[in-house]
Amino acid sequence: MEENFKKRNEDKDLIKRYELHKENKEAFYFSTDEYEQIVHHYIEHSKFRKALKALSFAMDQHPYAAEFMILKAQTYSSLEEYGLAIKLLDDASNLNPGDGDIHLIKGNVQIMQGKHEEALESFHTALQYTQEKDEIHFSIGLAYQNISDFKSAIKYFKMSLEENLNNESALYELAYCLDVLGELDTSVTYYKEFIDKDPYSEYAWYNLGIIYNKLEKYEESINAYEYCIAIDDKYSSAYYNMGNSFMMLKKNEQALDAFKTTIELEGPTPEIYFSIGSVYENMEQYDLAIRYYRKATKLDQFYDEAWYCTGICLGHQDKWYEAVHFFNKALKLGIENPDYWTALAKAEFKVGNTISSIDAYDEASQLSPNNPDIWKDWSKIYFEQGDMERAIGVITDGINEIPDDASLYYLCVVYYIESGKYKTAFNFLEKGLYLDYEGHTLLYDYFPNLETQKALYKIIQQYK
């Protein structure tokens, strides 16, 4: 720690000296190491133009130092000036043709340009001049991944890991590619074999936990995260993901403990506050849930899902006027989310704003026409108003969108019976029974009269 402090002070002094000389337009000279420190300082603080200026001085004073050409190329690529970056890398390669790093960096710039075939050529050239090949194999894997050749990507990510078991990025990208190809079960075997070779790889245990989570094997997922934490008890992402797995198992107290440990390790984030809010919502502790959702929106005012979930909790508390406000805030940020429109529609209806409710259901139905609940809830507004014609209109629109959903047919039966159109009602009843015979019991909820239920039962028995 003392050494780090001393180095930071030395770096500050160096930057101060450099900037003072430049400001006073004095003649100055710095060694290659000093220039590298100056340039890295500016790059780390995203001051790319200042980095370029320092590199110009460095290259004037050290014209044969290829490392400055490489640094300048990397700086240009950060500014998305890829053509200039490639030219510098070619110049650097002419000075040091056997430097594999130059070809590796060139390949990475070509990937940024979208020139994946050229990038692959550069990476394979780099392999000829480099002893430690794990980073190059990883870059080749990324190039194949970018062109959706996931099988080739998997091959090279595995090659990278054979050379460096601790390549965390390769472990993560490998899991992603296996997921895309639907080979998660295969990846479990691979990671277990990997762990047999290196049982103390926290990265392997962590990625195994992610895979189990995706396979919905939450107990195994938690077990893997616990091994990861046993190796590195500061691995905050493992605590966070373990909290999510506990949530899926409805082990809410354990989930809270995991999320709170994450905060202790990395400080609060909107995502962690949101996750804690979700746990409290699952526990029906709505005041606490709202408190944490609001903490999330305080850190990120554009967190639309947190605004939405605040509204959901207020709805559970029958605070519908307040819920409307929060659903509207969510919609300002996520206007194409059908769940937000549906929630707003329900809340508007609860506070008596029928027209606003209908408008919201209309929006929701356009965004998610295959959601039967939208059509059912929308039609029930007209049903409760006694407007059977419009109720039938909405529910038949729903049937046109989702012709294999029996519940829509049964609701249509209710509306036609209430309209006195029994023949049409029985036509829809027949279709509903054909799709889902057991689903007919919902009819009895709308006709509590015992005689009516008996009459319906007799008719339904004919179709059994």
Image (cartoon, rainbow, N blue to C red):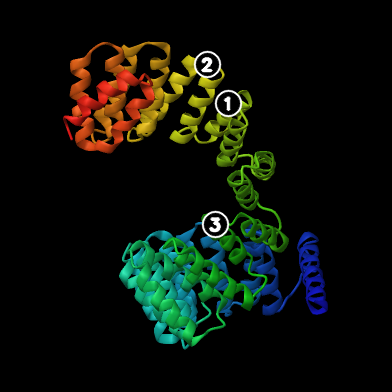
Say which label, 1 or 2, has the lower sequence index. 1
Observer able to see residue 265: yes
Label 2 residue SS: loop
* Foreground: disc 3 or disc 1: 1
Question: Which amino acid does the dot numbered 1 rest on?
Answer: Val
Above or below 410: residue 113: below
| Residue 415's disc number | none
Q: Is residue 42 left or right of residue 158?
A: right
Q: Nearer the viewer, mark 2 or mark 3?
A: 2
Residue 279: image location, x then y, percent: 61, 49
Q: Nearer the viewer, residue 20 or 67?
A: 67
Give x and y (percent) for residue 299.
Answer: 68, 45
Classify residue 208 as left or right of residue 140: right
Q: CA distance from mark 1 to mark 2?
A: 10 Å
To which residue does mark 2 refer? 353
Q: CB under 8 Å between callouts 1 and 2?
A: yes
Disc on the earlier residue, 2 or 3: 3
Q: Residue at x 42, y 25 (%)?
A: 361
Q: Quadrant of the C terminus?
A: top left
Amino acid bearing label 3: Leu
Query: In the image, what residue occupies the spot 31% across and 14% down?
Result: 418
Picture coordinates of residue 407, whole percent (x, y)? 31, 32
| Number of residue marks | 3
Q: Which residue is mark 1?
A: 324
Task: Give the quarter of the image for residue 65.
Answer: bottom right
